[in-house]
């Protein structure tokens, strides 16, 4: 599985941690930046780059990190075809895949601890979309987006 990953300076350290831990588990990452935790950058740039890679099929899923996860998720959700879920716990990260077929997980480095972030990513990457009644609901969102 190929994962788009991106962050701003506020999420850089957690992004790097996630890449390290999950690369060791066999996941492949395409890193859309940023390059350090010191230089102030604009989070939409990284949300758009990673989100476009997911939307166009270059990557299967995405992970975005900023200080809170809020801004970067708002930016990613402006991309047609992206369902980016801002999560702060492992249950939500699992359920957003299972019921919402989210294709990008957003989180905040200053909001979740490393252990929780790891569990969130694990749940997000390993949970399949349940379909059924949930597919009808996701299709309603997609239909609205396409009009």
Image: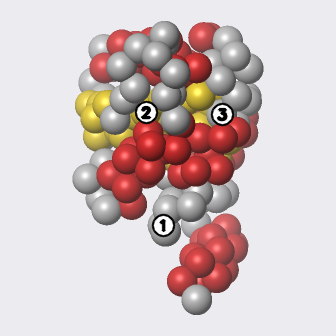
- Farthest residue toward the bottom? 147
Q: Disc 1 designates what residue?
A: 81
| Residue sitting at x 59%, y 84% | 143
Real-space CA distance between mark 3 and mark 1, rounded to the nearest whole angstrom: 19 Å
Label at residue 69: 3
Q: Residue 137, image x and y in percent? A: 69, 74
**Secondary structure category for the residue under label 3:** loop
Decide which of tag 1 and tag 2 comes sooner along the chain: 2
Name the quadrant of the N terminus.
Answer: top left
Q: Residue 77, image x and y in percent? A: 58, 57
Name the quadrant of the C terminus.
Answer: bottom right
- Where 68 falls versus 19 (above or below)? below
Q: Disc 2 designates what residue?
A: 6
| Residue sitting at x 44%, y 39% | 46
Pointer 3 local density, CA inside 10 Å: few below 14, some 14–19, many at least 20 = many
**Secondary structure category for the residue under label 2:** strand
């Amino acid at each position: 599985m190929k994962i788009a990953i991106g962050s701003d300076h506020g999420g850089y350290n957690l992004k790097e941690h996630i890449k390290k831990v999950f690369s060791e588990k066999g996941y492949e990452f395409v890193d859309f930046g940023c390059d350090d935790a010191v230089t102030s950058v604009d989070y939409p740039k990284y949300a758009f780059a990673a989100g476009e890679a997911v939307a166009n099929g270059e990557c299967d899923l995405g992970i975005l990190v900023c200080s809170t996860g809020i801004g970067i998720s708002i930016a990613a959700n402006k991309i047609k075809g992206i369902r980016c879920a801002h999560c702060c716990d492992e249950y939500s990260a699992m359920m957003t895949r299972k019921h919402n077929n989210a294709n990008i997980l957003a989180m905040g480095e200053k909001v979740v601890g490393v252990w929780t972030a790891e569990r969130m990513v694990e749940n997000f990457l390993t949970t399949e979309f349940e379909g059924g009644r949930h597919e009808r609901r996701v299709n309603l969102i997609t239909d609205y987006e396409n009009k």
